[in-house]
Image (spheres, rainbow, N blue to C red):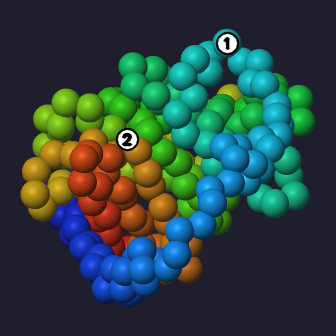
Amino acid sequence: MQAAAVRRVRVACATAVLAGAAVSAAPAQARPAPGSLAAPIVVVTTLTDDRIVEASALVSGSATDGRACVANDKGNAPLVYCVDLETGQTYGTVRMDGVEVVDSEAMAAAGDGKVWLGDIGDNDEVRETVNLMRAPYPDAGASSVRPRVVPLRYPDGPHDAETLLVNRSTGVRWIVTKEDTAGVYRVPADAG
């Protein structure tokens, strides 16, 4: 399958520049004590599955089912785990047959009971293509599927990315790179 071109979106925000100028012209105010504005982090669960060794991506199921999908980072099997957020136990798994996952870094809900797994990591920035894989949300037990694979190629060469966003209404996907200057790339809905 030919790699779809990913278009880089550059966002210039003159408003932010103007707002920054206005803020810098305002009188200096005392800074709050470190941590005083920080909201407390709440422990939800501890994952109990020994196969989840380097959780790198997580996406929640429906708002009411209390479950989430999680995937390991690079060097691990192409598995999506469904975990119970109350108990931390694995409820089900989906093995993605026929694919090799190089460096999965992100997940996003695809709608219709499916999830996108973003095999978009590239620490050395040498991968000519990266992949998005769409698979069903895991049911109870173990299953195997051939995911829909969307190979992608950046227009300006390899990048390392760790963020995948999906607009489920339009099908447009966004990838955010993590180099010194982050780039935002749009994957059109018709690209897989």
Q: In the rendered structure, which amino acid carries the disc numbered 2?
A: Asp
- Residue sitting at x 44%, y 39%: 105
Outermost residue toward the front in this view: 27
* Relative height, residue 132 to residue 70 (above, below): below
User: Is residue 57 visible from the viewing direction of this image?
Assistant: yes
Total numbered labels: 2
Q: In the rendered structure, which amino acid carries the disc numbered 1?
A: Asp
Outermost residue toward the top in this view: 50
* Relative height, residue 110 to residue 137 (above, below): below
Is 43 left or right of 92, judged from the image as shown? Answer: right
Q: Nearer the viewer, residue 72 or 78?
A: 72
The image shows residue 131 at horizontal and vertical percentages of: 32, 47
Residue identified by numbered label 2: 119
Q: Residues within 10 Å of mark 2 (few under 14, many from 20)?
A: many
- Residue sitting at x 48%, y 45%: 106
* Relative height, residue 28 to residue 74 (above, below): below
Residue identified by numbered label 1: 50
- Residue sitting at x 73%, y 54%: 37
Is 113 left or right of 80, judged from the image as shown? Answer: right
The image shows residue 96 at horizontal and vertical percentages of: 48, 35
Q: Nearer the viewer, residue 175 or 3?
A: 175
